[in-house]
Image (cartoon, rainbow, N blue to C red):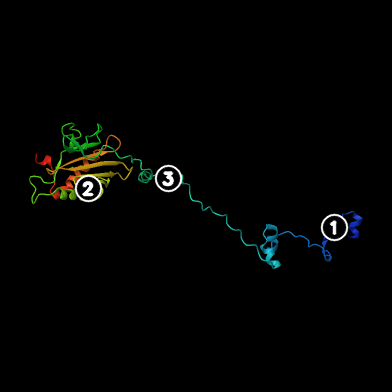
């Protein structure tokens, strides 16, 4: 663009400033750069694309392929740390099964003892988490009465010791007793020793049975660790006795 000065002779005599008008500029010289232009109303998409920083419109105008959209940022596939899992699944049963806190070595004083020519089970410690038929003459707090698999009022033939042992094994291993899972450790013709394990912390109770020739059954049930058992041993023995009653078993306290 160039400015042309226009003035009339009358204006020149009055001393007025010449007026300037815009005249069309001449065609650009070959090879000269294209003059820039501002984007305004009515300007096409190429201009908007050029000044907005986008290259899509210009690329289409020049016949070029537009750049593909950028890939999204990668997401992490790393698993959460073990500490997060433990904290988020604070389940007592799961933790107890992992650490098995109640598991302790098996006591060494178990099994029948010869006392004055007679087999008997061990006495209880001073803690209340034990009961035993052997405490009859020593400690009433730990004493429980014997059972009989041939009580006086029993109908039918007399059970043999082998039949009585079969009854005992069937009842004690039929399933969890008071929530504790049984497992036979030792079995002979007249002696049965089981471990009863709690499902939560893996606490173990040692339970023994000793069958006598007079059809009586001695037994002992003791928690392996701790002091108070919340009467778990008494409840277990009571549940087993109730399960044996349909087979003709009775507590001697019922007929003494």
Secondary structure under tag 1 reads strand
Residue at mark 3: 86
Residue 17 lies in quadrant: bottom right
Residue 240 lies in quadrant: top left
N-term-proximal mark, 2 vs 3: 3
Where residue 230 sits in the image (x, y, percent)? 25, 38
Residue at mark 2: 172
Which of the numbered marks, if any, corresponds to residue 19? 1
Secondary structure under tag 2 reads helix
Secondary structure under tag 3 reads helix
Depth check: give the residue in front, 251 or 77: 251
Where residue 158 sits in the image (x, y, percent)? 10, 49
Q: Nearer the viewer, mark 2 or mark 3?
A: 2
Is there CB contact under 8 Å for labels 2 and 1?
Answer: no
Is there CB contact under 8 Å for labels 1 and 3?
Answer: no
Where residue 64 sits in the image (x, y, percent)? 69, 66
């Amino acid at each position: 663009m160039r400015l042309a000065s226009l003035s009339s002779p009358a204006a020149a005599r009055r001393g007025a400033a010449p007026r300037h008008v815009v005249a069309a500029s001449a065609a650009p010289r070959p090879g000269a750069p294209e003059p820039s232009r501002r984007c305004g109303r009515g300007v096409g998409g190429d201009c908007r694309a050029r000044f907005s920083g986008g290259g899509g419109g210009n690329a289409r105008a020049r016949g070029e392929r537009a750049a593909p959209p950028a890939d999204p940022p990668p997401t992490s596939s790393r698993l959460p740390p073990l500490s997060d899992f433990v904290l988020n699944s604070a389940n007592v049963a799961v933790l107890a099964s992992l650490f098995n806190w109640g598991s302790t070595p098996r006591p060494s004083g178990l099994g029948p003892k010869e006392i004055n020519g007679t087999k008997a089970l061990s006495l209880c410690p001073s803690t209340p988490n034990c009961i035993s038929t052997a405490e009859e003459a020593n400690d009433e707090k730990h004493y429980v009465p014997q059972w009989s698999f041939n009580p006086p009022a029993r109908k039918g033939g007399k059970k043999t010791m082998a039949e009585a042992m079969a009854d005992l094994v069937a009842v004690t291993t039929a399933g969890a007793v008071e929530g504790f899972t049984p497992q036979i450790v030792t079995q002979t013709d007249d002696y049965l020793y089981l471990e009863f394990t709690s499902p939560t912390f893996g606490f173990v109770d040692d339970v023994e049975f000793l069958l006598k020739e007079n059809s009586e059954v001695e037994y002992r049930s003791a928690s392996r660790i701790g002091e108070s058992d919340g009467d778990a041993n008494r409840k277990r023995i009571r549940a087993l006795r109730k399960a044996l009653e349909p087979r003709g078993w009775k507590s001697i306290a019922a007929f003494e």
